[in-house]
Image (cartoon, helix red, strand yellow):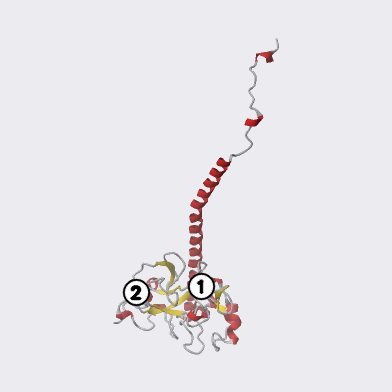
Amino acid sequence: MNDRSLRPPVATLPCSAARDGFSLVELLVVIAIIGVLISLLLPAVQAARAAARRTACTANLRQVGISVLAYHDVYAHLPPGSASQKRHRIAWSAVVLPFLEQPGVWQLIDVNEPYNSNANHDAAATVLPVYLCPSTARRAADRSEGRAGPLGAIDYGGMFGAMIGEVRWQQNGNGTLVWNTPFRLAQITGGTSQTILVAEDSGRGAASNGQWINGENIFDQTGPINREQSDEMWSDHPGGVHVLLCDGSAHFLPDATDTATLAHLITRQADPPP
């Protein structure tokens, strides 16, 4: 007897019942699941990018801090906020360039000429990435490609002083980077780790002195953080701004910092006279 005659017949499906792929309903379900996954991942990706930009901004300020302290090591004082009050107005952010790995740009600057003179144009027009916050989005109308007007832009301003809080804080130039007056670290009686040297002041154009060579790149703080984009602490980081302290460390200062605390952090004296 043939063994194959004892085997049960193999069941087969008719051709019309064969499955060739996804049904329309299944395809829509898969698309919906992918959409949900993307919507869940997108905030995480955006948060990671924002964190990376904050890290890069912090690194910029730390480099600036290293350059300022190196300047202090050589000259035994911090750079003045502006090397000349009314005539030439060469900024602190220009005179530290040799210590910021930019000696070539510094050599192009003629300190005996105004910052915006023809003699200084080539140097002043140079875009320096270390002076640009990667999060800056709300820019002045004349800010483009790293320039404020025709000159290289900067998103970090020197602290001229505090004009906020109690009357006793309202002294002209009570900060660390002021006109024609270089301070020694020993004169920062408020403590180098408790006193702001430079702060974010991003997105400024030429009208708001947002140029790294411009001696007006120093400012008074007159109110809370992130209230005004004109010579005030301002950034596009959610929740606050980065600041550089006189010890060379960079920190994130929340928007919610009260004005009395802010004034103490800005002024160079431990207890300014009334």
Residue at image location 50% in from the left, 52% down from the top: 39
Asked whether 55 or 269 is in front, the reply is: 55
- Element carrying mark 1: loop
Q: Quadrant of residue 11?
A: top right
Q: Which residue is mark 1?
A: 139
Q: Is residue 174 left or right of residue 22?
A: left
> Percent from the top left, x then y, of residue 174?
37, 81
Q: Is residue 167 left or right of residue 105?
A: left
- Element carrying mark 2: helix
Q: Residue furthest front?
A: 16
For the question of whether residue 175 can be seen, the reply is: no
Check residue 264 in the rendering and tell me which mark sits there, or answer none.
Answer: 2
Q: Residues within 10 Å of mark 1 (few under 14, many from 20)?
A: some
What's the amino acid at mark 2?
Answer: His
| Quadrant of the rendering where the N terminus is positioned | top right
What's the amino acid at mark 1?
Answer: Arg
> Percent from the top left, x then y, of residue 184?
42, 80
Q: Residues within 10 Å of mark 2 (few under 14, many from 20)?
A: many
> Percent from the top left, x then y, of residue 50?
49, 61
Compared with 146, 170 (above or below) is below
Circle nearer the viewer, 1 or 2: 1
For the question of whether residue 20 can be seen, the reply is: yes
Residue at image location 33% in from the left, 79% down from the top: 169
Q: Is residue 141 left or right of residue 160?
A: right
| Quadrant of the rendering where the C terminus is positioned | bottom left
Asked whether 135 or 111 is in front, the reply is: 135
Asked whether 171 or 71 is in front, the reply is: 171
